Image (cartoon, rainbow, N blue to C red):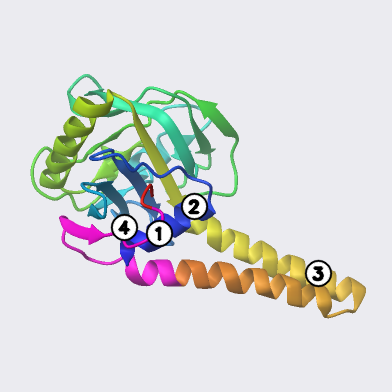
Amino acid sequence: MILQKMKAIMRHKGFKIFSRPFELNIVGLRSKSTIPNRFDDEIHIFYKVSNLNWYYHIFKATTDPGTFWLRQPLQPQGTAILQEGQFLNAYGMGLHRGKYLALVQTGPVAIIRDYNRDAILDFNNGNKTTGYFGINVHRANKTGTTKTIDKNSAGCQVFENADDFSLFLKLCQKHKSLYGNRFTYSLIDFRAVRRQNARYVAAGIGIAGLLGLGILAITQKEKIKNIVEEVGDFFSDIIQTKNNYEPQTDHSSNPSG
């Protein structure tokens, strides 16, 4: 069920799904929470192992920078926050800051910069930019589980648990041995969906008030309903505590994924 819902969301967003054996789909899920410095997001990894069988892993992570770098950005324009999107072949295995093996940015990605320096995650302001920013996928502390983000992310996608990250690297090594050192990272931002909902509400109320008609308001309401149902159903099954190694069977009529 989780696999099918994830695939449906990705198809809806126009994201590519990889379906060759052990070819990784790496998807970050940015939760609705705006509380900074917490590992309250997830990274989902899934891949096909046979015609019908997939494996699915869920790891706790952060897709946001920590409060240390929000207050003290590395760039005067502000701290980088990765935007929602799919970044095809934008990553490869390499050394994070020259220290240990991770997925490092090798192609352009899109970011916004939080320039308020108030330790509060700000997704509404700042310049949107595409380029090379060192937005890597790595771990927090070398061992164990890290409780707070702090200096561990200046915009990178960071695993909370070191053992989870070690498993992730093993999967990446398998992918690399079969398909080369190119990886795609996708980010689904449910805060963006919530902001979109708010815009639909405002648009529906504003237009209906100006025209004095209910037709346009009903149209906007249907858009809101569809998005809310999509996100609600997805979160009910996706954002929850799961075993990291879970076989999934795909019974869809499209075996290519």
Amino acid at circle 2: Arg
Q: Looking at the image, is mark 4 or mark 3 earlier in the sequence?
A: 4
Mark 1, residue position: 253
Residue where numbered disc 2 is placed: 11
User: Residues at badges 4 and 2 in contact (C-beta under 8 Å)?
Assistant: no
SS class, disc 2: helix
User: How far apart, in angstroms, are the residues tagged by discs 4 and 3?
Assistant: 35 Å
Q: Earlier in the sequence, mark 4 or mark 2?
A: 2
Can residue 120 be seen at all in this image of the molecule? no
> Which image quadrant is residue 200 in?
bottom right
Looking at the image, is mark 3 or mark 1 earlier in the sequence?
3
Residue flagged by tag 1: what amino acid is it? Answer: Ser
**Circle 4: is it few (<14), some (14-19), or many (20+) Cα within 10 Å?**
many
- Residue 40 is tagged as 4
Vertical position of residue 179 compared to residue 19: above or below: above
Where is the N terminus found, in terms of image quarters? bottom left
Query: Alpha carbon of mark 3 to alpha carbon of mark 2: how far?
Result: 31 Å
* Quarter residue 18 falls in: top left
* Contact? badges 3 and 1 (CB < 8 Å): no
1 vs 79, left or right, is: left
